[in-house]
Image (cartoon, rainbow, N blue to C red):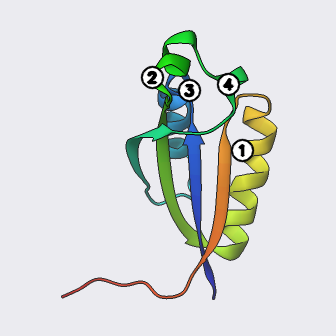
C-alpha cells in the first residue's frame, strides 16, 4: 500500500492542541515535531516582532501514514482546525524502513 508524509506547519499557540489531537487518534501511531522558522511575504500572519526579524516561529509535525489514513487525517484536520492558520503538504513516500 502506498504511504504519504503529512507535513503540518502549525502556529506555536496551536502546538499543544494539535499534538494532543494527534495523540488521541487511533489511526496515528506516532509523529515527529520540531520548531521551525517561516520566511516569506505573508506579513498579515506575522507579529510585529516577526516582521522585524523577517521570520515567523512555527512548529512542524511530520506524520507518516498509509495513503487512505493520511486522507482521513487531513479531512479531520480540516474539520477540526479550519481557520487556525495551519499549512500542510502531503507528499508520497518512495521508500521507508529501519537501518538495522
What residue is at 56 percent from the left and 26 percent from the top?
14
- Residue at (57%, 43%) from the top-left corner? 9
Identity of the residue furthest to the left in this view: 100
Instruction: Check disc 3 and report its element: helix, strand or loop.
Output: helix
Residue occupying the far top of the picture: 48
Q: Earlier in the sequence, mark 2 or mark 1?
A: 2
Identify the mark nearer the N-term, 2 or 3: 3
Quarter residue 6 falls in: bottom right
Query: Could you give the CA–CA distance between mark 2 and mark 4, rounded to whole angstroms?
Result: 11 Å
The residue tagged 1 is 77
Q: CA distance from mark 2 to mark 1?
A: 30 Å
Q: Position of residue 79 (x, y in %)?
A: 81, 39
Q: Secondary structure at mark 4?
A: helix
Give yes or no for contact between labels 2 and 3 (Cβ–Cβ under 8 Å). Answer: no
| Disc number for residue 43 | 4
Is residue 14 left or right of 36 when viewed as pictured?
A: right
Instruction: Identify residue for label 3.
Output: 14
The residue that appears at 54% across and 39% down in the rendered structure is: 39
Q: Give the total of numbered labels.
A: 4
Q: Quadrant of the C terminus?
A: bottom left
Sequence-earlier tag: 4 or 3? 3
Q: Secondary structure at mark 2?
A: helix
Q: Nearer the viewer, residue 48 or 20?
A: 48
Amino acid at each position: 500500500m502506498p504511504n504519504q508524509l503529512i507535513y503540518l506547519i502549525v502556529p506555536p499557540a496551536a502546538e499543544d492542541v494539535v499534538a494532543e489531537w494527534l495523540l488521541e487518534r487511533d489511526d496515528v501511531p506516532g509523529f515527529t515535531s520540531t520548531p521551525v522558522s517561516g520566511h516569506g511575504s505573508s506579513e498579515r500572519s506575522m507579529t510585529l516582532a516577526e516582521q522585524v526579524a523577517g521570520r515567523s516561529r512555527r512548529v512542524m509535525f511530520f506524520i507518516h501514514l498509509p495513503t487512505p489514513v493520511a486522507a482521513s487525517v487531513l479531512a479531520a484536520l480540516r474539520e477540526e482546525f479550519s481557520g487556525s492558520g495551519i499549512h500542510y503538504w502531503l507528499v508520497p513516500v518512495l521508500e521507508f524502513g529501519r537501518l538495522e
